[in-house]
Amino acid sequence: MAAFLCLKELVVAANSRSLFDGMMVYFERETAIDLEFAADLHNLWVQFIDRTNDRKLFISQLEGVPPSLMSYNYCCDFVKDGWLRFGLRSGQ
């Protein structure tokens, strides 16, 4: 049974002559796994924060775009949607 793998390792360590060494190896391995997980989680958070900051910067740059340009783009999208709604291709 895979669920009792750690329990089997503890039984083997308890029955060995070098119980202390066996337990140290077990705990060092488990601690290394936990530290690797923590480092990976930290890296994910750093990437998340970087992407969030990039998006904030992009949004702040969009807020600096003149309203006339924004409304022009909105009008173009509206016209394109209208053409698609009536089954026309652009320019017809």
Image (tube, rainbow, N blue to C red):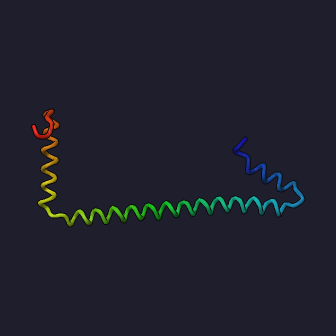
Between 54 and 21, the residue placed more toward the observer is 54
Front residue (pair 65, 20): 65
Please name the residue shown 77% across and 61% down the image: 25
Residue 32 is drawn in which quadrant?
bottom right
Hey, which residue is sitting farthest top in the picture?
87
In terms of image quadrants, where is residue 17? Answer: bottom right
**Foreground pick, 37 / 54:** 54
Q: Residue furthest right?
A: 17
How far from the left and from the top, in percent, is residue 66?
15, 64
- Judged from this view, the residue extending furthest toward the front is 91
Of residues 2 and 48, the one nearer the viewer is 48
Q: Position of residue 36 (x, y in %)?
A: 61, 61
Horizontal arrangement in the rendering, residue 71 relative to residue 32 (left or right): left
**Relative vertical location of residue 49 with respect to residue 71 in this rendering, above or below:** below
The image shows residue 37, relative to residue 3, as above or below, that is: below
The x, y position of residue 45, in whole percent, is: 47, 62
| Left or right of residue 85: residue 54 | right
Q: Which residue is painted at 15% across and 43% down in the image?
A: 80
In percent of the image, x 22 and y 64: which residue is there?
63
Tag count in the figure? 0
Name the image quarter holding the C terminus: top left
| Residue 19 to residue 89: above or below | below
Instruction: Please give left or right for residue 45 compared with residue 62 in the image.
Output: right
Q: Quadrant of the N terminus?
A: top right
Residue 12 in the image: x percent, y percent? Answer: 83, 52
